[in-house]
């Protein structure tokens, strides 16, 4: 508690008491919002072997032996329409059904008349299947659609389809990896 009080005193000196209190209110709102989201999404998870997929308000997160493999938006999808990319991390996510062997999560996009249903099912071999159904509220022409995974920089090797360790390609921007 002493450390926080010192930060508050420094903020009062540097920016004034009102600004310091506004920062406290903003930080408290952030903590309360985070706790509320953690409570909403706590039980929305699917585990198969060492793999676990958890729901979150920006998409799905992938874990291996309890350690997150993804970052930021995690697993999501992007659609190029009307000359612009739109991604599902900006949509409103909601768990529809959570069972021991599957979860169903919906999202409604804020910028487009799109609704997605993500159906994840546990398989016996320690893997998980994922099916994404897309509904549009009106006729739309998608120029391109991508299924995306944002991976943490901590990892640089994966197992390819023949179960051989392979280094991730080095890149700085969005890159298609097959």
Image: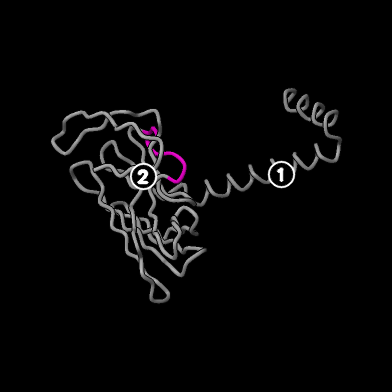
Neighbourhood count class around disc 1 (C-alpha, 10 Å): few under 14, some 14–19, many 20 upward? few
x and y percentages locating residue 75 in the rendered image: 38, 47
x and y percentages locating residue 15 in the rendered image: 83, 34
> In the current view of this chain or complex, which residue is farthest to the bottom?
138
In front here: 8 or 83? 83
Residue occupied by mark 1: 26
Number of disc labels = 2
Q: Which residues are magenta?
A: 66-73
In front here: 118 or 83? 83
Depicted 168 relative to depicted 34: above or below: above
Q: Is residue 69 magenta?
A: yes
Image point (35%, 63%), residue name: 143
Q: Quadrant of the C terminus?
A: top left
Q: Quadrant of the N terminus?
A: top right
The mark closer to the camera, 1 or 2, is 2
> In the current view of this chain or complex, which residue is farthest to the left?
162
What is the secondary structure assignment of the residue under circle 1?
helix
What is the secondary structure assignment of the residue under circle 2?
strand
Neighbourhood count class around disc 2 (C-alpha, 10 Å): few under 14, some 14–19, many 20 upward? some
Q: Is residue 18 left or right of residue 84?
A: right
Q: Is residue 17 left or right of residue 63?
A: right
Magenta stretch: dominant SS? strand
Q: Is residue 26 left or right of residue 15?
A: left
x and y percentages locating residue 172 in the rendered image: 40, 35
Query: Mark 1 to mark 2: distance in Å?
Result: 31 Å
In front here: 38 or 160? 160
Earlier sequence position, callout 1 versus callout 2: 1
x and y percentages locating residue 30 in the rendered image: 64, 44
Depicted 63 relative to depicted 56: above or below: above
Residue occupied by mark 2: 149
Image point (43%, 51%), residue name: 59
Image point (39%, 39%), residue name: 70
């Amino acid at each position: 508690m002493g450390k926080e009080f010192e930060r508050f005193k420094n903020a009062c000196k540097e920016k004034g008491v009102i600004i310091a209190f506004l920062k406290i209110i903003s930080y408290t709102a952030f903590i309360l919002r985070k706790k509320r989201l953690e409570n909403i999404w706590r039980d929305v998870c699917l585990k198969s072997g060492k793999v676990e997929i958890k729901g979150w308000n920006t998409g799905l997160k992938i874990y291996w032996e309890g350690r997150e493999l993804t970052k930021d938006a995690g697993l999501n999808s992007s659609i190029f329409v009307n000359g612009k990319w739109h991604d599902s991390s900006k949509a409103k996510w909601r768990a529809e059904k959570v069972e021991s062997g599957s979860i169903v999560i919906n999202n409604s996009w804020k910028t487009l008349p799109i609704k997605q249903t993500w159906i994840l099912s546990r398989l016996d071999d320690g893997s998980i299947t994922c099916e994404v159904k897309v509904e549009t509220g009106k006729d739309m022409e998608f120029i391109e659609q991508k299924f995306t995974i944002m991976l943490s920089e901590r990892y640089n090797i994966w197992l390819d389809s023949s179960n051989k360790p392979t280094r991730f390609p080095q890149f700085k921007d969005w890159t298609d990896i097959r």
